[in-house]
Each structure stands twice: as structure tokens, then as C-alpha cells.
Amino acid sequence: MPLGIKPIVDFAFKKIFGTAVQTEPLIGILNAVLEPDERIIEVEILNPFSYQDFADDKLIVLDVRACDAAGRQLNIEMQLTVRGALRQRLVYYACSLFTDQLGKGEDFDLLRPAISICLLCANLFGDSVAHHRFRLADVAHGRTLDGTVEVHTVELMKYNLDEASISQASRLEQWAFFLLYADRYEGDELRKLLPADEFEEAISTMETIRDKTEDRIMYDQREKAQRDYLWAIRDARKEGREEGLEEGMEKGIEKGLEKGLEKGLEKGLEKGKLIGKIELLRELLGDAPGPRVELQEYSMDDLSALLAKLQERIRSRG
């Protein structure tokens, strides 16, 4: 029977990657994203998993903060949707990781790199690149301010994940597969697909959530709250699009009427000038004046033709 536990649900994500006594999954995904010259072998989780964080239906910021043996400040979070100012928020929190290290009067030499990782179940950028890595850089000369602030975005949906080849894929692709599809497999099936120790701990945690009554109730509540939140966002976006369409139609009609009125006035003035010239020439030629209403019914082409005939008669008289 499939596990039925989605790692992207906040309760499961935090328990898998944020449990203080079980850091292998967190170390594994950090190494997969960062690919550091010296692999991370130890981390201290600064905001460990707590049941109290999930005691109500309030949506929390789903992140795990940690510090590795080199003192680097690390943050990894899961985002199910892309909201308006997400890019700015990612930069803001990465900078906060950097600046919050110092107390009043402490030396800047104490600052260690601050690295923020955002795992996304939606696309943030329009290209086909799944993993972007941002640093402070001089774009004109290619120089970077290393050891300061770094932001990673991992757009999970951009990976071409295949069960048949996942065992030979990169470790980051394997984690993407785990996050997106682990709920569809039995524990032992998943272990065969992803045999590394870091996945073993993650799978065991998912089995605990499935089998432990307290965890399963909490997980179901969080999944429902998360689903309701996503539905609310989609409904708001749909309503916004419909309102925008309606407003656009109203503005279009208004603009069309305004433009039509302007064209009508221009055409009316032009027609009035032609009729005025015709009436003047008829008077000069001694013709009996016709009713103005009759001329109003003429088309512009007919009025122009009549005017041309009258002008020719004037010229022929010298």
C-alpha cells in the first residue's frame, strides 16, 4: 500500500528535515543543492521540529534553519506557489541570516556565509533551468563577493524525472523525485529506487507519520489547511482575472464609444462642410435650393460627386 504521505506538506517536510536527532536527510539535500567543495557532514538545527508549531490551522513559514561545522548559516524552505514578492522575500531573509549573526559591538570578521534555499512546486522563472544560484556579483567584470549571501531556487517541476532512470540521476534530481512522488510508493519500493542512507531516514519518518495516530491526525489537518490555502489563492487569482477581464471590457467599450463619437463628429463636420459648399454653389448658379434634409441623406461619395459637378458648371461659365 502506498505511503500516502506527501513530503511537501509542511508537517511532513519539517519532521523529515527538521528533526534534531535525525539530520541525515537535511545534510543530504543541502549537499545535493550546494555541492560544496567540502561536503557538509554535521549540522545543528536551529529551529527543530515541534508539535506546538502545528497546533492550529495557521499557515507557518515552512523552513528549516541550521548551522554547519564551518559556521555557515543555512535555510531551506518549501514553497507550493509563487506569490508576488517572493524574489524580494528570498533576498530579505538571506540578508537577515547574514546580519543577525552579529550582536552589538561584535566584529564583522565573525560573519559567516548565509545561504538560503527555496524549493518550489511552481515555476518562478520563464526559462528551462531548474536550479538557479545567486550571489553578490559585479556583472561587468565577473567578480563575486564570496562568503557573504547566497540564494538558491530549485524549481522541482522542471526536472524530467523517470522512475526507470532515477537511480542513475543526480542526487538533487533524486530529492526532487522524493519530494514530488514519494507518497505514491510503498516504503520498500521507495528504498529500492532511492537506496542511500539519507533517504532511508526520510522514508522511515514518513512511515512513522503514516502509522502513528497522533502524527497522522496532525498531517491530515495540515494537508487540508494547505489545500484550502491553495484553493483560496487559485480562487482569488481566478476572481482577479475575471474582474480584470470585465474591467477591460468596460474600458474597451467606453473607449470604443468615445472613439466612435469622435469619428462621428469628425465625419459630421466634414459632411456639413460639403453640404455648405453645395448650397453656396447652387445659390451662385441660380438653382432652386433643395431641402437640406435631402442632402443629409446623401453619402459622402454622393456629396463629393455633386459638388464636383457644380464646380464644373461654375468653371464652364467663366
Image (cartoon, grey):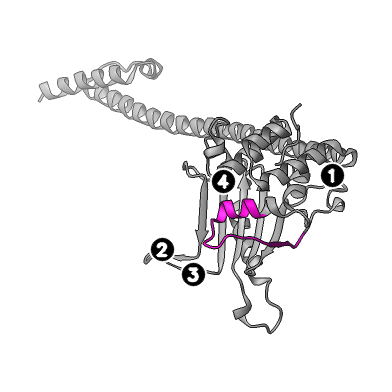
- The label shown at residue 139 is 2
Under tag 1, what secondary structure?
A: loop
Q: Residues within 10 Å of mark 1 (few under 14, many from 20)?
A: few
C-alpha distance separating marks 2 and 1: 44 Å
- Picture coordinates of residue 116, whole percent (x, y): 61, 58
Quadrant placement of the C terminus: top left
Query: Sequence-wise, which precedes: disc 1 or disc 4?
Result: 1
Q: Amino acid at mark 2?
A: Val
Mark 3, Cα crowd under 10 Å, few <14 / some 14-19 / many 20+, is few
Residue 184 position in % (x across, y down): 69, 30
Task: Report how far apart the C-alphas of labels 2 and 3 lie in the structure.
Answer: 11 Å
Neighbours of disc 2 within 10 Å: few (<14), some (14-19), many (20+): few
Which quarter of the rendered picture does the N terminus lie within?
top right
Q: Secondary structure at mark 2?
A: loop
Foreground residue, 227 or 300? 227
Side of 189 relative to 315 (left or right): right
Dot 4 or dot 3: first in sequence order is 3
Q: Is residue 51 above or below residue 72?
A: above
Q: Is mark 2 in CB contact (under 8 Å) with mark 3?
A: no
The amino acid beneath tag 4 is Arg
Disc 4 marks which residue? 171
Sequence-first disc among 2 and 1: 1
**What separation in Å lies between label 3 and label 1 (alpha carbons)?**
41 Å
Residue 223 seen in the figure: yes
- Which residue corresponds to mark 1? 57
Amino acid beneath label 1: Asp
Residue tagged 3? 145
Mark 3 belongs to which amino acid?
A: Leu
Camera-nearest label, 2 or 3: 3
Q: Against 206, is 242 above or below?
A: above
- Tag 3 or tag 2, which sits nearer the N-term? 2
